[in-house]
Amino acid sequence: MIIIPKQNPNPKQMERLIAWLKSNGVGVHISQGENRTVIGLIGDTSKIDIDLIRSLDIVEDVKRIQEPFKNANRKFHPEDTIIDVAGVKIGGGNFQIIAGPCSVESEEQIIEVAESVKKSGAKMLRGGAFKPRTSPYAFQGLRGDGLKLLLEAKNATGLPIVTEIMDLNQLNLFDDVDVIQVGARNMQNFELLKELGHTNKVILLKRGLANTLQELLMSAEYIMAGGNEKIILCERGIRTFETYTRNTLDLSAIPVLKGLTHLPVIVDPSHSTGYSKYVMPMALAATAAGADGLIIEVHNNPQYALCDGQQSLTMEAFDKLSKQIEAIRPYAYKYNV
Ligand code: PEP
Ligand code: MN
């Protein structure tokens, strides 16, 4: 980090700033130019509050030359992280598809979809039990009962399960869940992230509706700071002025994140586009761009789905999509570290 003080700063205030920086554990290098002094900070500056320094009277500008995230940073961990979900590997060249309905609705529904997506090549089953709905009058999920049905589907098919947690007090119900999803709306629920950092569960962390990639990485950092390094990042579209799609899929998040972090990066073409007809092209594009996997909504009867039917693929469409993904996988962009 570099601090550029204003011209002729008050010497007492300068001394105080330097003493404060040193007390925060960073080395201070002062270079005295003819007209300007520049303060260079040496060491781990991740705990330094850049906005606080910027607000000081004597400071003209502050520039970070190192990212504020450390554990998630590829600079300090050049190798790709490979995450093992009950024997299914993701990251470091291992590409996986997670598929299943938006919400668990009934035993027949979840078992039928689980068996079908497994046959088509999905290696993990998704299904929401606790649902973050915009309207309080919309279906809220089967909650605890939904988790039980998901576990039944796991037992029936052997597929590891991925499901969303919405609140800390639900954590005790997630013991047998293989991947805990933190949804877009909870990406910055810092208390939840901290607590998940103390578990040894794999966390699927989705990008918030209006969050930058650096904010996504800082949320991963919250989990990692607690000791849990098993995080899969997910680009699921961000809110823009465009209305023909539910969100705007930021495909460039894939190369950007792959450069910045060693964590696996997957894409959700369902929530990002909002319409089943756009899922296939975007799933193929994300695969070609080198994503480590996809999470796709599939329903046995999308027309009657209790949630997100319009963006859910039929089981037949998912089967077709998996075959196309398989066909283009050998040509997908590979990230060389
Ligand atoms: C979901 O995956 O069911 C979901 C609600 O996704 P998001 O948090 O990305 O909206
Ligand atoms: Mn959904």
Image: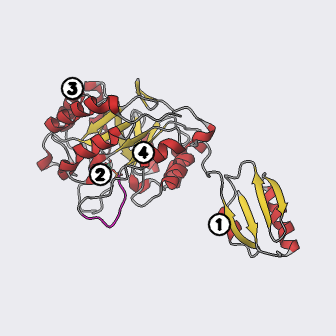
What separation in Å lies between label 2 and label 1 (alpha carbons)? Answer: 34 Å
Q: Residue 20's x, y, as percent?
A: 80, 61
Magenta stretch, residue numbers: 237-243
Q: Residues within 10 Å of mark 4 (few under 14, many from 20)?
A: many
Of the two numbered discs 3 and 1 on the same chain, state the one appearing first in sequence. Answer: 1
SS category of the residue bearing label 2: helix
- 75 vs 184, left or right, is right
Q: Which residue is mark 1?
A: 51
Residue at the (59%, 38%) spot, across then down? 227
Image position of 11 with respect to 166: above or below? below
Q: Specify whether residue 238 is in view.
A: yes
Question: What's the mark number on residue 119?
Answer: 3
Mark 4 sits on what residue?
254
Q: Relative to 187, does residue 3 appear above or below in the rendering?
A: below
In three-dimensional space, the C-alpha distance between marks 2 and 3, rounded to whole angstroms, equals 23 Å
Q: Which mark is residue 271?
A: 2
Residue 280 placement (x, y as % from top left): 22, 43
- Quarter residue 157 falls in: top left
At horizontal 71% and vertical 48% (from top left) the residue drawn is: 44
For badge 2, the amino acid type reads His
Residue 278 image position (x, y, % from top left) = 22, 49
Instruction: Indicate the amino acid at tag 4.
Output: Ile
